[in-house]
Image (tube, helix red, strand yellow):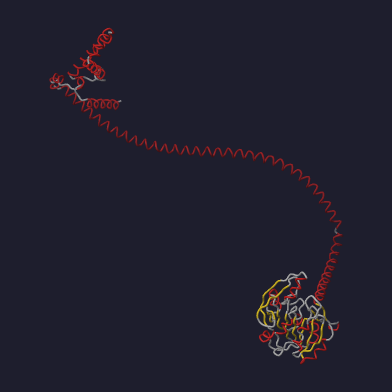
Amino acid sequence: MSFISYAQNFEDVLLWRVLKHVPAGSYIDVGANDPELHSVTKAFYDAGWSGINIEPMPSYRAAFLAQRPRDINLSVAAGAASGSITLFDVPDVNGWASTDAGVAAAHRAHGHQVVEHTVPLLTLAEICRTHVRGPVHFLKIDVEGFEGDVLRGMDFSLCRPWIVVVEAIMPNSRDSNHASWEALVTAHGYQYAWFDGLNRYYVADEHAGLAAGLRLPPNVFDDFLPHQLDQAWQRNAALQQQAEQAWEQAQHHGAQLADVAARGTELEQILAQRARQLEQREHDLQQLDQQYQRLDQQYQQLDQQCQHLDQQRQRLDHDLQQREQELRQRHAQALQLQADLRQSEAQVQQLDASLHQAAAWGSDLEQRLLAVYASTSWRITEPLRVLMRRGENSLPNLARRQLRASVRRGVRWLTSRQWLRRLLLPVVARSPFLRALVARTLHLLHLGGAPAAGAADVPHQLRELPLSARKALDDLQRARQSHQN
C-alpha cells in the first residue's frame, strides 16, 4: 500500500523512509499549524505514532483536539525565554503566522492583511521537561523566521531528537536564513544531512547512519502518493462507481423503455379514448358552468332577499325590544295601579267606616236637634234668643245694616245730582272734619255694603249656632245624602 504524504514539500516521505521501522514513534512539531493540511506528522499519526503539537494560533486548537486525541496539543509559542509574545497571523494564507515583526511587515508590504494575537511563550526545554517521556524520533520547526529563537530555548542535552528538520528560508522568499541559527544545532552533536529546497535536515551523531537515507529527494521508489492525489483518486473511484451504477440503471431503464414502447400502442388507444372522454367532459363542464352561472344569479338574488329579510328582522327585533320595554313599563304601571287600587280600596273601606260612623253621629245629632226644636223650653226662649242673638243676624247688626243701606241710598241720591255735587264738594274740601267724615263713610260703605253670602239661605232655627257648627252640620247632611244614594 502506498504511503500517503500530507506535507507541503514531502518532508514526511523522507522521514518515513528512514524511520518507518520504528513502531509507535514520537515527534515534536513546532508550528504545527493544521492537523492535516501540509502536516508533516499526519501520516505518522495515522501509522500509530503520537507526539507534541505546538501551535499558538487559537483557531486551530479545536481541530487538533478533535483529530489528534492521542497527541499533546499546546496553544503556546516556543521561544528563547518564557513570557508572552505577539503573533502575527495572515488569515488569507494558511501557514504564514509568525512571531517575527519583520516578516509581518513584509507580508503587509505584499498587500496581505496581518492580525496580531498575544499568546503565551515557553521554551522548548520547558516543554520537553514537562511532557517528554522517552525518545523523540524527529523534531520539526517551522515558525516563519523565528527558528533561531526556538533553537535558543532548546536543551539538546535534556532531549535529543534523532532527526531535526528546520525551515531554512525566509517566508515568501527563496533566500536562506540558516546561517543565523545552524550553529545552535551542529554545536550539540548534530550533522547536516540534506536540504530539500525548503528545509535543512540534521542527524544526531548517535544516529548518524540515518543520514544516508536522507540524501536523495523523494522519488518513485518511495512508493508514495500526495494526499491531494489520493483524494482525487478516491473521488475518481467514487465517480467511476457512480458511473457504473448509472450505466446499470440506464440499461435497466432501457429495458423499461422497450417495455414502454411495446405498450405505446395500447397507451395511444387509451389516450384517444381518454381524449374523447375529455371532450365529453368539457361539454358537460360547459353545461355545468352555465348551470352554475344561473345558480349563482339565483344565489345572488336569494342573498339580496336574505339581506332584505335580515334588515326586516333587525327592524322587527328592534320593534319587539321596544314593545317588550313598553310592556315591562306598562306591567310595572299595572302593578303600581294595582297597589294604588288596593290602597284606594283600603282608603274607601276606611272612609266607608268613617262615613257610617259620621252618619250615625249625624242621625243622632239630628234627632237631638229635632227634640230640642220640639221642646217647650225652646219655644218659650225664642224671644230671648232673638234679643241675645250673635253674629250676622243679631239686632245690632240688623240695625247697622239698615243704617248703612239708608246711607248708601242717600249717597247715591247725592251723587246722582250733579248740581248738588258742585255745591257740596267745595264746602267739604274746605273742612278737614267733613273730608275725614266722608272718607270714613265711603270706606265703611265699601267694606260692609253687601250682605253676608249665604245668610239668607240659613234657616232661622240655625242662625244662633256658630258658623263652624253650621258647616259641620252641612258636611254631615251631604255625606248622608251621598250614602243614601
Q: Nearer the viewer, residue 34 or 366?
A: 34
**Where does the image place residue 90, in percent across and percent down from the top left?**
74, 72
Location of residue 397 (image quadrant): top left
Q: Nearer the viewer, residue 385 or 407?
A: 407
- Locate residue 479 relative to residue 465 in the image: left or right: right
Q: Nearer the viewer, residue 293 or 219?
A: 219
Query: Looking at the figure, which quarter contains the N terminus?
Result: bottom right
Location of residue 91 (image quadrant): bottom right
Query: Looking at the figure, which quarter contains the C terminus?
Result: top left
**Where does the image place residue 299, in percent across and percent down from the top left?**
67, 41
- Locate residue 330 relative to residue 312 in the image: left or right: left
Residue at x 32% of width, y 36% of height:
346
**Where does the image place residue 248, in percent across and percent down from the top left?**
84, 68
Q: Is residue 168 above or below residue 373?
A: below
- Locate residue 337 relative to residue 437 in the image: left or right: right
Q: Is residue 87 above or below residue 390?
A: below
